[in-house]
Amino acid sequence: MKQISFKSTLVALLLIVSIIANAQDKKLPNIVILATGGTIAGAGASSTGSAYTSGQVKIEAMIDAVPNIRTLANLKGEQLANVGSQDMSVKVWLDLAKRVNELLATKECDGVVITHGTDTQEETAYFLNLTVKSDKPVVLTGSMRPSTALSADGPLNMYNAVALAANPAAKGYGVMVVMNDEIHAAKDVKKMYSTPVQTFQSPQEGMIGTVIFGDILFFHKPHGRNTINSEFSVAGVTSLPRVDIVYGCADMSPDLIDIMVKAGAKGIVIAGVGDGNMNAATLEAAKKAAKNGITVVRATRVPIGAVLVKGEVNDKEFGTICSDELNPQKARVLLMLALQKQRSWDDMQRLFLEY
Ligand code: GLU
């Protein structure tokens, strides 16, 4: 009799402990980590060598490698892709946008973190900035050193990204990129260094905040329309029109534009010199393409500064579009979404000034 009562007391105690643990669990925000690969999931043979392969480690192992990360949020991981981001594709962008929208539409998800290679992370962040229909936090992160490297930067970046996504104060900032203790807005962030850990910078607008061991400080709100204020949607979309980028230089070859049009491009972004300029022959080719219904956007190969609507090129007269603040790779993203419907010159130019 004595033994039975001891057992039932023990069972009752365990039940209470598990109810308390569950209640505490429920108080934490629910964050989903969508993994796409990159160096953060990369592995190399040596901890001090620079050779490695992206996208080797699975999301559950990545979460388990970050001390205390489960004290920030209830975490679930999903493996959406596992590639180096040089292999990021429109298909994965569409899958990501749809999954993020599905998740954030539910009460059970308070924010999303996306792990991603850094090479094209700014493009994915900007794509989601235009196509996510929620003001809940969406945070991209990655690393410059593979998981097997000495002083790997991935675990702390992931910890900080989860802390940001789990913080209700991060609502309404659009899609963000967290790396190296800094928070950057999707529209402004650029990969500025090929390999060092401070690769992401917003050289013109500045970082929007910092996150240091999970403590967040915001400095300013991002500018430009995003997420719930965006007019773009990828609901039901399975592909996007082809848009190519041509790189400007002295004595550039104008026939590159004709080659792209022949290959099926519906839009062309010119990473022009200076204020989105190109030599006279290329400008003629651009005007011809624009007359034939191809949207030609003038961006710049210069890393900092906007291309001016009222510069050396009269866009309205020539039928070209000015990229304003978007670098060539982000202008391409906006153009692919914009080309989903027929637009007047004014309407197309408006998009580049508003987003
Ligand atoms: N190729 C890698 C990628 O973008 C480079 C670096 C990285 O992930 O940080 O996936």
Image: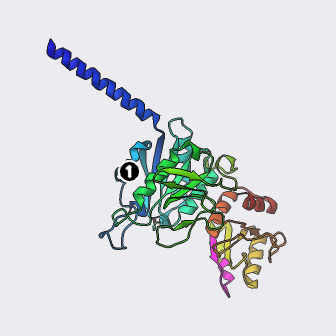
Q: Which residue is identified by label 1?
A: 63
Amino acid type at circle 1 is: Ile
Q: Quadrant of residue 190?
A: bottom right
- Of all residues, the one furthest to the top in this rendering is 1
Q: Position of residue 210 (x, y in %)?
A: 54, 56
Q: Is residue 253 left or right of residue 161?
A: right
Q: Nearer the viewer, residue 268 or 289?
A: 268
- Does the segment drawn in magenta span residue 310? no
Circle 1 packing at 10 Å, graded few (<14), some (14-19), many (20+), is some
Residue 354 x, y percent position in the rendering: 74, 57
Residue 217, position as x, y percentages in the image: 56, 52
Residue 249 falls within the magenta-colored stretch:
yes
Rendered-image quadrant of the N terminus: top left
- Secondary structure category for the residue under label 1: helix
- In percent of the image, x 37 and y 65: which residue is there? 151
Q: Nearer the viewer, residue 276 or 247?
A: 276
Residue at 47%, 49% in the rendered image: 162
Residue 83 shown left or right of residue 203 in the figure: left
Q: Is residue 264 visible?
A: no
Residue 181 rendering spot, x and y as whole percentages? 50, 59
| Foreground residue among 54 and 284 | 54
Name the side, left or right, on which 312 lies relative to 69. right
The magenta span reads 244-257
**66, above or below 207, in the image:** above
Quadrant assignment, res 183:
bottom right
